[in-house]
Image (cartoon, grey):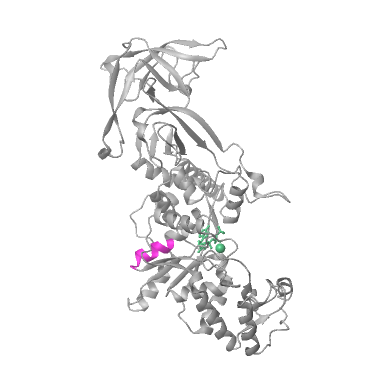
Amino acid sequence: MSKESQANRSDEVQRDFIRDIISKAVAQSGDKMQVHTRFPPEPNGYLHIGHAKSICLNFGLAKDFGGICNLRFDDTNPAKEEDEYVNSIIEDVKWLGWDWGENLFFASDYFDRMYELAKELIRAGKAYVCDLSTEEIRKMRGTLTEPGTNSPFRDRSAEENLELFERMKNGEFPDGSKVLRAKIDMASSNLNMRDPVMYRILHATHHRTGDKWCIYPMYDWAHGLEDSFEGITHSVCTLEFEDHRPLYDWFLEQLGIHHPQQIEFARLNLTYTVMSKRKLLSLVEQNYVSGWDDPRMPTISGLRRRGFSPEAIREFCRVIGVNKQNSCVDYALLEHCLRKDLNKTSKRVMAVLNPLKVVITNFPEDGVEQLEAINNPEDASQGSRKVPFSKELYIEREDFMEEPPKKFFRLAPGREVRLRYAYFITCNEVIKDDKGEIVELRCTFDPQTRGGDAPDGRKVKATLHWVSAEHAIDGKVNIYDHLFTTENPEKVEEGGDFTDNINKDSLKTLNCKLEPSLADVKPFERVQFERLGYFCCDKDSTPDNIIFNKTVGLKDTWAKILKQRDNQAKQKQQKKKS
Ligand code: ATP
Ligand code: MG
């Protein structure tokens, strides 16, 4: 099925290979299994659109199967984790529309239980304390074609290991001097199984446990335990953990505790952006953006500030679906889903971003007319509003040309156009300053054409948006472009860095004129500026300093891309035939 036909069927029941696996498991249990998933972010940064895919998948599975989804902070690395990140993650998952109820957990709450289970493995002769350095461990690990070498500390007795492990915990040894390793197989064809590290010494303060611990569990050891403790049935993660699955399984088998099924899917990549938290953090730290929620960032908070709705993001996640092939999704598809939602929901208003004054010469000097404007032609329940019309107006500078080329149908000397919800006007005179720049147009209006067509049936070829000069409010508009100039910012020249591909012109700020109904616009309110695109009131906007962020233009580039792809495919087929 093409992406478009997928995109147009929002009411369809979702099917994918993960839902198939879970359906089977539920059926095999005689419908007794309660599906239990989790979303396990590490609180070392803000969530991005890739995380949204995982969130919608995990919470969506729980919803579809009448199960539960936990929000669990995988906070096992004290060095990079902070409460600020925890709070932002909670806010973002909620905003996306998901609810974990009572099921909010922190991996750090399990540190004691994990420690006890590690001792159990030691007693069973399946884990040992190793004094090799990280570098030595790496060297002795072998390669894909050569087996590794056993550590000289591999055969320590259980008593000695237990004693050393306890002393590690008590902080008797410096960072990096010892680790606890699983005793599996240094000749395993899977490198992850070659006596992986379970604990390392780290004298660091943890955002929740403070200085209680001097040892911290490694991901592979900790993650399966967290899943097991919480009774997770299906542990869904991204493809890079496929090679870790044997280890995930090994730990749980050795311990004989509840054993969730790990299932991997492809992570989301998007054109014109980077998705790793480490890279996003460096954009923030190096001031390429104003913060994690800069409207150019692919973070959930950035997208929210840009004007994305949770519905649009959820729809995008539904449309891309889940599969096992890593790929890169076109940013235009994300915008397509966004437009689809904003078109239905956004109130239409008029704003002029690049104002040119128009004087209606035959309109009374102090006259003001309140004209009826429809708030949303897609949704009659949004009603209508009044917009004032007066002698002096602003129109968009781009909507006038003194010497129009053939295909320019908007305003020009001697030409008549319609002003949206108002009248037909005809341009009679162009006023310029000393430098020859156009500063004003003198026009006449036809009182017979109020709010619609001319009674004599004469047609105009363009309808322009406008605001009344006297009534307009001044505002600022931020216009954004992609943060990177290339589709794949990670692709750089030898010795380069992804920041080499930063787009230096990704933000332009304009002073604009807004229709008066926007006087009480609230931060995060989304509107459509007629003919210009969708805009969202910025979080820092105040009635004295109204700021809008351009969310997205009106033209759907995704449809065009699909058409191009279709044509290319047809051409290929024709070539094959001939
Ligand atoms: P990053 O590489 O951006 O730092 P991460 O995988 O380290 O991401 P986590 O906090 O560990 O970030 O991720 C939480 C969950 O979100 C994990 O289950 C992870 O697999 C998933 N996830 C992260 N990035 C993506 C992505 N681009 N697409 C789909 N799922 C993702
Ligand atoms: Mg991670």
**Residue 58 part of the magenta-drawn span:** yes
Q: How many marks?
A: 0
Relative to the observer, which residue lies in front, 313 or 510? 510
Question: Is residue 10 rendered to the left or right of residue 287?
Answer: left
- Left or right of 389? Residue 181 is right
Q: Residue at x 47, y 70 (%)?
A: 235
Instruction: Look at the picture and state if 255 lies above or below 339.
Output: below
Horizontal side of residue 374 vs 278, given as left or right: left
Instruction: Decide if residue 212 is on the left or right side of residue 131.
Output: left
Q: Does residue 163 appear in the picture of this structure? A: yes
The residue closer to the viewer here, 533 or 123, is 123
Residue at coordinates 71% horizontally, 81% vertically from top-left?
151
Main secondary structure along the magenta-highlighted residues: helix
Q: Nearer the viewer, residue 423 or 2?
A: 423
Q: Position of residue 387 (x, y in %)?
A: 31, 26
**Residue 146: percent from the left, percent from the top?**
72, 76
Residue 103 versus residue 113 in the image, above or below: above
* First to last magenta residue range: 57-66
| Res 185 seen here | no
